[in-house]
Amino acid sequence: MAANRPAQALNRTNRNGAVVFTAVLFLAAVALVCAIGAVVAGSVTLPVLLVAVACGLVAASSIHMTMDWEKAVVMRFGKFNRTAGPGLVFTIPIVEFYSVRIDQRVIATYFGAEETLTSDLVPLNVDAVIFWMVFSPQKAATEVEDYASAVAWMAQATLRKAIGRATLGEVATRRDQLDAELKEALEEKLDGWGINVMDVEVRDIVVPKELQQAMAAEAIATRERNARMILAEAEADISDMLKDASENYVEDPEAMRLRTMHLAYESVKQSGGTLVIPSAFSEGFTGDPEVAAKASGAAKAPKASRAAAKKPPVG
């Protein structure tokens, strides 16, 4: 499951500038006090160095730099006082302290549900991503200990509950509905922590290999059944149309003969061959039995005369 996580981007933002600012501020305060002590006492003694370090710590703890996407939560005597930033944040030494920085950008958190049983007792591995952001730094700092970890654990628990209420088919075919259900449930739970859920996306649903062949066979059988049903419906429609056509041909023999001629022409046209019509079949074209009989008798007469000519005379 962990191998499916996307690689982290190389251009992630950092707080190196703020760290450098604090370090430079500390060194500047120490250097300034040491310079003043050297002028007054004539040299940098140990007491002067200790005072310089103390002044540097006070300066570093009183002036803070927050980035554009951050909010600083300032506590006074252990109670929430205000949120400050971005930019420079000033606090009163000892009385106030800089407790936490809240990132107010949209954060993507990966979470998954491994070997979670559906309502029809099928184990599934599901990967998902939640996009969220902090809209209330005060609540995120005071209502929950580690809000980022809490979001991940809450999302995983909610995903397991949603999968347990659905069947395998519902989870596989109604992914959008599952996304909407997770988003609604997480919004309701995380709103009290000052967190807004932007979106929830199910990335992948993995079915055990033992069930994949059975599901494939079931899908093939279902498609074959649907194909046969469609073929049967087509045959039923064709039989109804042929029945209606036969009624028209019974009432109009000429139309039947024209249809016969048309079928013969189409067979010759498609094959590119020659059509040989037997004498019995020709009655369908003439429609006159007497003409067909005369044509048949005329055809037999030459055969009889040739047979008589070949017969030897009797002595």
Image: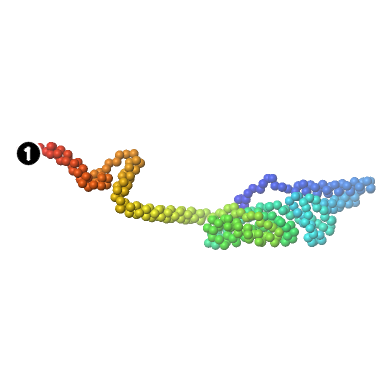
Question: Residue 229 placed where, x, y %?
Answer: 42, 55
Any part of residue 193 in sight: yes
The residue that appears at 21% across and 45% down in the rendered structure is 291
The residue that appears at 25% across and 44% down in the rendered structure is 278
The image quadrant of residue 141 is bottom right
Q: Residue 73 vs residue 156: left or right?
A: right
Amino acid beneath label 1? Val
Q: Quadrant of the C terminus?
A: top left
**Camera-side residue: 292 or 71?**
292
Circle 1: element type: loop
**Camera-side residue: 213 or 106?**
106
Q: How many marks?
A: 1
Q: Residue 315 vs residue 6: left or right?
A: left
Figure coloring? rainbow
Question: Residue 206 placed where, x, y %?
Answer: 56, 54
The residue that appears at 46% across and 55% down in the rendered structure is 222
Q: Residue 68 vs residue 181: left or right?
A: right
Circle 1: is it few (<14), some (14-19), or many (20+) Cα within 10 Å? Answer: few
Question: Residue 142 placed where, x, y %?
Answer: 74, 60
The residue that appears at 90% across and 46% down in the rendered structure is 35
Question: Residue 19 placed where, x, y %?
Answer: 78, 48
* Residue that carries the numbered disc 1 in the rendered image: 314
Q: Is residue 271 above or below residue 183?
A: above
**Camera-side residue: 268 or 95?**
268
